[in-house]
Image (cartoon, helix red, strand yellow):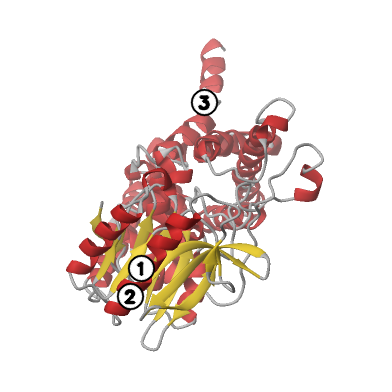
């Protein structure tokens, strides 16, 4: 009896074990090997003769542990420009409540997998299909509910496995999640047949796992061989913090960039730190003391563009259009602004405030608000169509696909990783950029203010990183 009670209590450790294994697949550990067994303890727990409520509870514990770790970096996001936290009752309460809500919602998503297991038992539906399908649906629902985030999707765990990563080119990050769940179910069935001493069946499952993994691996080898050449010679300007910015340092950086005869020069998000009025063609002087400095540097950039008419310049600017502020990317060529892209999906609780009118009853919001852009996902000149993703938009696969549908030759990601005080955010955003390259089969040039300046090929391999 005592031994049975100990064994029963040990089973209670299985859901937390799954949560911890899933957490190891996320930066900074990035143990991609553990993703193939992370769900096995939870699936074992679900296989016990317990109630549906207990199964749901086990899934919730797994999800809560994993997503608490995944959501933790959001607490380090510094760009909370939308509110004066000094006026909040109990400082940062709203931020903490958001984090708890995020984790609880995400945990519930994995708990739904228990329903799949129950259906498998009751209706004799093959677990091999039902659990992966249910989990991927829960990931999709989680992304739809939480502002379309694909943050923490388990498919990104294989971003360092170049050949397996190529699956995203045909099935996307959700398909890669399905593939991972399928391997986990096969491992569970293998272990259960070994425990039941059904060795012939165990050998069959071993062969199936090997064939599925090997098939995916060889497909990746084939896809990598199809890599295209870089679309153009690009230079990403060195990182620049507003506190260290000066026209002299900018002029030197620009001269260095142009010395290599590039076809494209990219400057990170909000490079000058001052909003630019598109109609007035000037920086907003009454709001920022840096405006004269930005005017000087921008004039240098336009002059260099005149001297190098064949060079494209893409830079991140906060812009003003029709009395609205936007987080934008502008295309310059031959001394003139040729096209503009306004960020579509704003970062929640930093650029966009869900329920803002209600929340402002509890604290004073800043006047500086960023509006959502709409329409095209590209900027164009006569020769090129360039897809643009602004910072956190790398988390949205559909935006990269929209750019490709609109005829993009390659993608540019302009970001500001300086808002993240936690390097996990920078690492995960880079992993997502690798997936966007694979999904679209397009080169990505990624410029960030204080993160990774990266060139990524069509297989998701990092060609240059500094």
126, 53: nearer the viewer: 53
Residue at the spot x=25%, y=69% of the render?
A: 224
Q: Quadrant of the N terminus?
A: top right
Q: Can residue 269 be seen in this view?
A: no
Circle 2: element type: helix
Residue, disc 1: 301
Name above or below for residue 407 compared with residue 192. below
Left or right: residue 306 compared with residue 49: left
Circle 1: element type: helix
Distance from disc 3 to disc 1, alpha carbons, whole Å, reads 60 Å
Name above or below for residue 382 compared with residue 281. below
In the rendered image, residue 314, in percent from the top left (x then y), is placed at: 39, 69
Residue, disc 3: 13
Furthest toward the left, the residue is 260
In the rendered image, residue 256, in percent from the top left (x then y), is placed at: 21, 61
Distance from disc 1 to disc 2, alpha carbons, whole Å, reads 6 Å
Q: Nearer the viewer, mark 3 or mark 1?
A: 1
323, 117: nearer the viewer: 323
Q: Can residue 215 be seen in this view?
A: yes
Residue, disc 2: 305
Image marks 1 and 2: residues in contact by CB distance under 8 Å: yes
Q: In which quarter of the image is residue 47?
A: top right
Q: Quadrant of residue 37?
A: top left
Image marks 3 and 1: residues in contact by CB distance under 8 Å: no
Distance from disc 3 to disc 2, alpha carbons, whole Å, reads 62 Å
373, 279: nearer the viewer: 279
In the rendered image, residue 133, in percent from the top left (x then y), is placed at: 56, 58
Residue at the spot x=38%, y=78% of the render?
A: 335
């Amino acid at each position: 009896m005592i031994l049975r009670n100990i064994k029963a209590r040990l089973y209670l450790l299985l859901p937390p074990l799954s949560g911890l294994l899933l957490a190891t697949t996320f930066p900074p550990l990035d143990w991609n090997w553990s993703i193939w067994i992370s769900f096995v303890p939870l699936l074992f727990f679900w296989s016990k003769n317990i109630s549906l409520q207990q199964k749901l509870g086990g899934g919730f514990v797994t999800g809560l542990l994993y997503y608490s770790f995944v959501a933790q970096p959001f607490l380090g996001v510094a760009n909370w420009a939308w509110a004066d936290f000094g006026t909040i009752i109990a400082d940062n309460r709203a931020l903490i409540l958001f984090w708890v809500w995020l984790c609880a919602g995400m945990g519930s998503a994995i708990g739904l997998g228990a329903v799949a297991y129950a259906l498998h038992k009751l209706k004799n539906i093959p677990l091999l299909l039902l659990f992966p399908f249910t989990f991927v649906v829960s990931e999709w629902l989680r992304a739809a509910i939480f502002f379309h985030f694909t943050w923490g999707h388990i498919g990104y765990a294989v971003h360092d496995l170049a050949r397996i990563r190529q699956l995203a080119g045909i099935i996307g990050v959700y398909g890669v999640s399905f593939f991972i769940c399928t391997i986990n179910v096969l491992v569970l069935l293998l272990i259960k047949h070994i425990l039941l001493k059904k060795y012939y069946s165990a050998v069959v499952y071993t062969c199936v796992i090997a064939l599925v993994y090997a098939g995916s691996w060889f497909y990746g080898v084939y896809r990598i061989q199809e890599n295209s050449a870089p679309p153009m010679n690009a230079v990403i300007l060195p990182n620049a913090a507003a506190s260290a910015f000066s026209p002299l340092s900018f002029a030197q950086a620009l001269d260095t960039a142009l010395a290599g005869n590039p076809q494209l020069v990219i400057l990170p998000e909000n490079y000058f730190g001052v909003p630019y009025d598109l109609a007035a063609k000037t920086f907003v002087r009454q709001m920022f003391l840096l405006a004269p400095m930005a005017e000087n540097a921008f004039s240098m950039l336009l002059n260099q563009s005149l001297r190098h008419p064949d060079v494209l310049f893409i830079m991140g600017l906060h812009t003003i259009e029709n009395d609205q502020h936007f987080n934008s990317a502008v295309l310059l060529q031959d001394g003139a602004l040729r096209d503009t892209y306004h960020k579509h999906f704003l970062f929640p609780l930093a650029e966009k405030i869900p329920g803002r009118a209600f929340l402002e009853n509890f604290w004073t919001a800043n006047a500086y608000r960023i509006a959502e852009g709409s329409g095209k996902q590209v900027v164009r000149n006569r020769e090129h169509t360039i897809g643009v993703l602004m910072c956190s938009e790398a988390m949205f696969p559909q935006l990269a696909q929209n750019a490709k549908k609109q005829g993009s030759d390659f993608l540019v990601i302009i970001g500001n990783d300086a808002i993240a005080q936690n390097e996990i955010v920078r690492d995960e955003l880079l992993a997502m950029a690798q997936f966007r390259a694979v999904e679209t089969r397009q080169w990505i040039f990624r410029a960030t203010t204080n993160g990774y300046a990266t060139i990524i090929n069509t297989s998701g391999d990092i060609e240059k990183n500094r």
